[in-house]
Image (tube, rainbow, N blue to C red):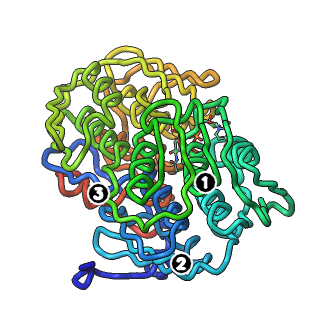
Amino acid sequence: MDVASSVITPASSSSTEPRLMDALVIQGGRPLSGRVAISGAKNAALPVMAATLLAPGVHRLRNCPQLVDTRTFGRVLEKLGAKVTFGKDECLIDTSNVNSVEAPYELVKTMRASIYVLGPLLARFGAARVSLPGGCAWGPRPVNLHLQGLAAMGAQLDIDHGYITGKDVRLHGANFHFDVVSVGATAQLLMAATLAEGTTVLENVAIEPDITVLGDVLSQCGARIEGIGSRRMTIHGVKSLRPIDTAIIADRIEAGTFAAAAAMTGGTLTLERVVPDHFEASLAKLEEAGCTVVREVDEVTITGPSRPRAVDVTTMVFPGFPTDMQAQMMAVASIASGTSVITDTIYLDRFTHVPELARMGANIELKGNVAVIKGVEGLSGAPVMATDLRASAALALAALVADGETRISRIYHLDRGYENFDDKLRGIGARVERIRE
Ligand code: UD1
């Protein structure tokens, strides 16, 4: 493993603490053009990091993005006794000496995806004590399906003092039908089932790329999984798995966000190292808005129109339009010619960006989970506040075309999921500065 030339830091390195008071200052109106190397996907990396708990040994995750969230997950693994090092473009996780099964509140409260450790801990050690995640900025986010599925597999879990606790658990195969398609719960049960005794059948599973690649990664390590990519997966439990050595897939949401930047600025951007099919729903919508898109094997070139056209968007599970692109698409719609209707069916309250976009001059009427956006000719720079990860991205997009200066406070939300976002923007001609407030 050649990481000698890389900068190697443990997940808990203090230099990687989220810088809570950073702000982005963006001068709008600059044409954007050039090439952007899209990073590894946060939402693909996190479950793979959790899956390292399933097998003792040294796991290697190439193209692993260095983000606040992947660092936080690294800290959760370190709490359990794993050794986690981030080198340039890769993360090494040694799970040979895991000696604890507790994921504490202090870490879980900062990142809900920490709950991914629950299934692997129960499967490998028969015990877990994991803080129950709370809601998030834009509403409740239940974990009932995770718990019901694990219970169906024989895990008697107690919930007390804010923790989910399981002891002396021996997971067995089960038939489980998800009444809602859930990315997280699918990953959770898939990981748990790989080491359970007997056969598990999961019905109505998520088929987001983050899930199908998790299935592929587990299969490469010796898991016996049928139906990857379909709505029904059958997992035959095995006694043990081998350590993971894989490359994390490109982030389809980061790619979609930069595609939206081209759409809004009328620029031409080439997105490198992507899987075009993974963000086809976003590309198709942007074409409908007037963009020209050239898809190649592992890159996409997108040219924005002089002004985008209004588009209607309804978020759906994959391969539908992702909820994680809803806020960015609203930024596009806010300057489009005509009226767009954007409906979020996955998270009904995910609209904290609406009042902030309105501060920049957007005309948006929100009724429940439906936003009606009357496109305006131009936005104006203003001080705004990032409220969550994708809302922050939408504000940055709006700032790129706004008249004058926009200061986006609380940019740590953006740092959770976008690797080197301001560097990448500067690289394609944007005037962006990161300041400490
Ligand atoms: C993942 C993504 C997140 C994305 C979301 C939907 C990660 C780390 N996060 O979140 O970026 O926005 O998928 O694509 O990958 N639900 C239940 N009970 C449960 C679990 C979920 O009712 O136990 C509901 C949720 O409230 C929501 C829907 O199922 O309405 C989908 O949520 P889910 O796919 O589980 O989202 P996450 O995995 O949390």
Given residues 82 and 131, the one toward you in this image is 82
- Examine the image and state in which quarter residue 209 appears: top left
**Left-right relation of 43 to 286:** right
Q: Give SS at disc 2.
A: loop
Q: Residue at x 64, y 23 (%)?
A: 368
Horizontal side of 26 relative to 46 (left or right) equals left
Q: Amino acid at mark 3?
A: Val
- Residue picked out by circle 2: 82
Q: Compute the Cα span from label 1 to label 3.
A: 44 Å
Residue assigned mark 3:
432
Q: Which structural element holds mark 1? A: helix
- Going from N to C along the chain, the mark reached first, 1 or 3, is 1
Q: Is residue 42 above or below residue 98?
A: above
Which label sits on residue 192? 1
Amino acid at pointer 2: Ala
Closest to the camera, between mark 2 and mark 1, is: 1
Label of residue 399 in the image:
none
Q: Do callouts 1 and 3 mark residues in contact (Cβ within 8 Å)?
A: no
Circle nearer the N terminus (2, 1): 2
Residue at horizontal 28 percent and vertical 43 percent from the top: 258
Rendered residue at 37%/43% (across/down): 253
Q: Give the label, 2 or 3, closer to the camera.
A: 2
* Crowding at mark 2 (Cα within 10 Å: few <14, some 14-19, many 20+): many
| Mark 2 or mark 3, earlier in chain | 2
Quadrant position of ligand 1:
top right
For the residues labelled 2 and 1, the Cα–Cα distance comes to: 19 Å
Quadrant placement of the N terminus: bottom left
Which image quadrant is residue 58 in? Answer: bottom left
Q: CA distance from mark 2 to mark 3?
A: 38 Å
Above or below 358: residue 8: below
